[in-house]
Image (cartoon, rainbow, N blue to C red):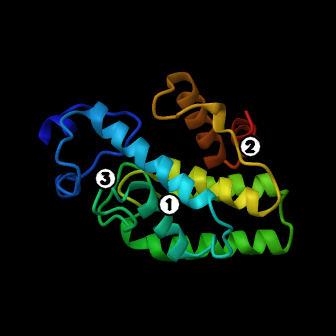
Amino acid sequence: MSDVFDQPDDAATPLSVEEQRDLIPSHISNRRELNEAEQENIVRGQDWALGRRRRDLLTEKFTTNLHKQMLGEVWRWAGDFRHSERNLGIPFYEIPAALRQLLDDVKAWIEYKSYPPDEIAVRFQHRLVAIHPFPNGNGPHARLMADLLIMQLGGKRFSWGRANLRDAGKMRAQYLSALRGADNHDCGPLLEFARS
C-alpha cells in the first residue's frame, strides 16, 4: 500500500497515514490504479446523482451522501468530514458550521435572486472547495454539487473546461487560477471556466 502513496499526486490533497489505511480495494498497488478506481467510483456517483430529481440538494445529509456515493467504494471515510488539518481549507472543527452557513447562504441567494443562477452555482462550488470538508475528492464533489444546483435552477450542466481536471495539466492550471481569482472576490474567471 505504501507504494501507492509514495508517488506524489498534485491533483489530490495529501492524506494522513490513518486516512491512507482506509483504502478499500486491496489490489491497488500504484497511483494510476488508485486514480482509476476513484474515477470509476466518481462516475457511478454522478450517475446516481443525475438519475433522480433532488429536492434535498442543499442539506448536509445530501452533501455527505453524494461524497459517499462518489468515493465510498474506494475509501472507508467517504462521506465523513475530515478530522485533520490540510494545506488548504478551513480548520476541520469548523466544517459543520461553515457548511450549514454556506447551505443557508445559497438558499437565501436563490430566494432573493442575489445573483444570476450560474453565479449562484459557481459561488457555491467555490465556497464548498474553500471549506474542503472531506479528506479528498473535494473538487469533483463541489463541481458535481454545482452542476446539480444549476440544473435544479433550470440551467444546463457546466462543462468545467470539458476535461478531467485531475489529468489535464493546462486546464487544471486554468481552473486553479480561476479559483484563486474567486478567492480574491472575482468570480468572473471561474464563471467563464465553468462554461468553457
On screen, 91 above or below 32? below
Question: How far apart are labels 2 and 3 at the CA level?
Answer: 31 Å
Q: Is 124 placed left or right of 13 in the picture?
A: right
Most foreground residue, 21 or 124: 21
Q: Which mark is residue 191?
A: 2
Q: Is 76 placed left or right of 133 in the picture?
A: left
Q: Is residue 90 visible?
A: no
Task: Name the residue tied to disc 3.
Answer: 74
Question: How far apart are labels 1 and 3 at the CA level?
Answer: 22 Å
Task: Name the residue tied to disc 1.
Answer: 131
Q: Quadrant of residue 95?
A: bottom left
Q: Position of residue 185 (x, y in %)?
A: 69, 49
Q: Is residue 144 visible?
A: yes
Number of numbered discs overlaid on the protein picture: 3
Q: Is 17 placed left or right of 53 in the picture?
A: left
**C-beta proximity under 8 Å, tags 1 and 3:** no
Sequence-earlier tag: 2 or 3: 3
Q: Is 37 placed left or right of 49 in the picture?
A: left
Q: Amino acid at mark 2?
A: Leu
**C-beta proximity under 8 Å, tags 2 and 3:** no
